[in-house]
Amino acid sequence: MMQRRTFLRTMVPAVAAAQYALGQSDSPWGGPVLDTHLHLRANADACYTHMQGCGVSHAVLLTPAADQDRAKAEMEKRPGHFVRSVRIDPAAADSTEVLRSAIKNGAVSIGELKFHLALDSHEMQKVYDLAADLHVPVMMHIQVFPHFAGEMPYNTGYTQFDKMLRAHPRTNFIGHGDLFWAHISADVPTDRGYPPGPIKKGGLTDRWLSDFPNLYADMSANSGNNALSRDPEFTPGFITRHKDKLIFGSDCSCADGKGSGISQNNNPEATRLSGKCVARETLTVLKGAASPQIFRAITFENGVKLFKVPTT
Ligand SMILES: [Zn+2]
Ligand SMILES: [Zn+2]
């Protein structure tokens, strides 16, 4: 026991202590799990119900600026399980002040930003600078192929995103969404959101995760699950290569953490996960493809560090 405790403390002191306190045997995943992509739900405690159903111990509640007080109430009801983000359309006239004030009041991140702006727009760059100044990460939903007729693209210009990664070295960026994950492969079709099949080496997302210390990857939703599942020979190497940059999140909308209710609604291309809990599915893929140590990093330690989640 002494040896194990010494080893863990050397690795990541605060996280190791929290894991030890929580008792790893209580979790179906062998330790605490942080879901960094859980949208605040309309009904009180519905987020916590989902977490209990899928074995998640901690979560970042993705919260619009207008719902900060409601998220705070959820956090107070279940102390020690939640932190919250803040989001507002960066094109809103008072966006900088709204974000700044929510972060001063306890929000730990900005996101998810899912608006019809270019990644290199003035509005987005103002957010990147604010995130750097306030030491919080910023997460973007990157998608151009529509889920339904008439859906407009979000956060366009991904193929030139390296310019932003270079121009804002103090900003911690978290990529998420269909196109971010389609670029795990060098071959990106334009007629679908979730390309299946073998991955061609040299994809932009794979390269940039290696090249830029300030880029992280949110593995949530069908997009993250699909990228990890489509080429089982590619996945273990990708996970090992980016073990410090991958962050587990679910973006699941099932009711009970077991797949009931509407999941992946309004997105016919994502039916492969209908009736399933995305959190459980992605944790299962990760469990199969990562060593226990890397699984723990991706599902807990990396997110705790990046979002500064208190775990004591
Ligand atoms: Zn999203
Ligand atoms: Zn679920």
Image (cartoon, rainbow, N blue to C red):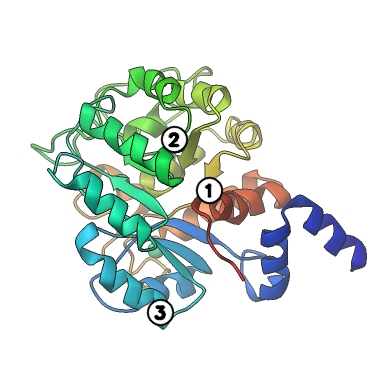
| Residue assigned mark 2 | 171
Question: Is residue 195 visible in this depiction of the protein?
Answer: no
Q: Quadrant of residue 121?
A: top left
| Nearer the observer, 121 or 129 | 129
Of label 1 and label 2, which has the lower sequence position?
2
Disc 2 marks which amino acid?
A: Thr
Near mark 2 (Cα within 10 A), the count class, few <14, some 14-19 or many ≥20, is many
Cβ atoms at labels 3 and 2 below 8 Å apart: no
Q: Residue drawn 42% across and 69% down?
A: 257
| Residue assigned mark 3 | 76
Q: Residue drawn 19% across and 51% down?
A: 266
- Position of 98 with respect to 180 (left or right) is left
| Residue assigned mark 1 | 306
Give the image quadrant in which the ligand numbered 2 is located: bottom left
Mark 1 vs mark 2: give the one in front.
2
| Nearer the observer, 181 or 85 | 85
Question: Is residue 201 visible in this depiction of the protein?
Answer: yes
Question: Can you say whether 231 is above or below 303 in the image?
Answer: above
> Label 1 vs label 2: CA separation?
11 Å
Question: Can you say whether 35 is above or below 114 in the image?
Answer: below
Of label 3 and label 2, which has the lower sequence position?
3
| Nearer the observer, 69 or 50 | 69
Of label 3 and label 1, which has the lower sequence position?
3
Coordinates of residue 81 in the picture (x, y in percent): 49, 71
Coordinates of residue 53 in the picture (x, y in percent): 46, 73
> Label 3 vs label 2: CA separation?
29 Å
Disc 1 marks which amino acid?
A: Leu
Near mark 1 (Cα within 10 A), the count class, few <14, some 14-19 or many ≥20, is some
Cβ atoms at labels 3 and 1 below 8 Å apart: no
Q: Quadrant of residue 263?
A: bottom left
Q: Quadrant of the C terminus?
A: bottom right
